[in-house]
Amino acid sequence: MKSCYIGFKRVIDFIFALIFLVLSLPIMVSSCIAIKLESRGPIFFKQPRPGKNGEIFVVYKFRTMRVETMRDGTTLTNMQRITRVGSLLRKTSIDELPQMVNILRGEMSFIGPRPLLIQYLNHYSAEEMRRHEVLPGISGWAQVNGRNAISWEEKFKLDVWYVDHLSLVLDLKILLKTIQNVLARKGVNSSSEDTMPYFSGKKETAN
């Protein structure tokens, strides 16, 4: 049953990603212009990430940070580097729209564990590595249940739980909660606090 749903999910992902990409084209074009007008640097943020079975792919997002990492001799934090346009793109999740391309290419799904840094692969336990048994997603069970407000350990437990309970009903539940969070601007990186700390395999919290 689970394997049948995975095949069905891939078809649905492709169809809706194509539709969403066409419908959101005016928003994406406007975002490209706004990004270029506000700060120098590329329009898109591209970074290799591990996908299903740990296979590496390049994830696409709109750039939301300045390319500069220093100001007046001081290293800027990630939150300090976020531009005004970038903050808006994050709050509305528009920065995730380029990942429709990743979905069309079969590298991602709408719902699944978020693709993290390649460097983390060496720090996962055997159980935590199970998060890579399915395609990574734009939103996932961990994202609608805490996102940056929970520890890495809790996040990975939620990811593995999702892998074990993958179903249409669960995906629809995550999708609805994601829409609610976006509309309420809940769980996005819009506060003065920094983003999640680097995962080193040790028990860490987001605070």
Image (cartoon, rainbow, N blue to C red):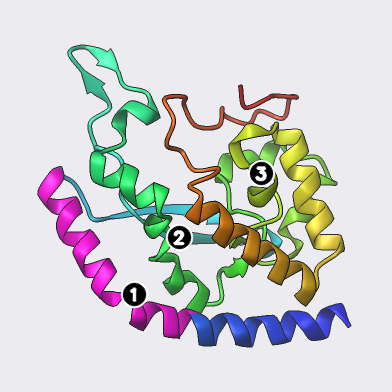
Instruction: Label 2: state its secondary structure.
Output: strand
Q: Answer yes or no: do the residues labelled 1 and 3 have beta carbons within 8 Å? A: no
- Residue appearing at x 44%, y 30% in the figure: 191
Measure how far apart labels 1 and 2 are at the Cα level.
21 Å
Q: Which mark lies nearer to you, 1 or 2?
A: 1
Q: Which residue is mark 1?
A: 24
Front position in the image: 81 or 168: 168
Q: Which residue is mark 2?
A: 58
Q: Crowding near pointer 1: few (<14 within 10 Å), some, many (20+)?
A: few
**Where is 72 relative to 129, above or below?**
above
Residue 32 on the magenta span: yes
Residue 43 point in image, percent of width and height: 23, 55
Front position in the image: 151 or 72: 151
Viewport quadrant of the C terminus: top right
Residue 70 point in image, percent of width and height: 24, 21
- Residue appearing at x 72%, y 41% in the figure: 155
Question: Extreme top residue here?
Answer: 73
Q: Crowding near pointer 3: few (<14 within 10 Å), some, many (20+)?
A: some
Front position in the image: 189 or 109: 189
Amino acid type, callout 2: Val
Q: On the rendered structure, is 80 left or right of 202?
A: left
Amino acid type, callout 1: Ser
Q: Quadrant of residue 97?
A: bottom left
Residue 180 on the magenta span: no
Viewport quadrant of the N terminus: bottom right
Question: Extreme front residue here?
Answer: 184
Amino acid type, callout 3: Leu
Residue 169 point in image, percent of width and height: 78, 73
Marking on residue 121: 3
Bounds of the magenta span? 17-38
Instruction: Label 1: state its secondary structure.
Output: loop
Residue 122 point in image, percent of width and height: 68, 39
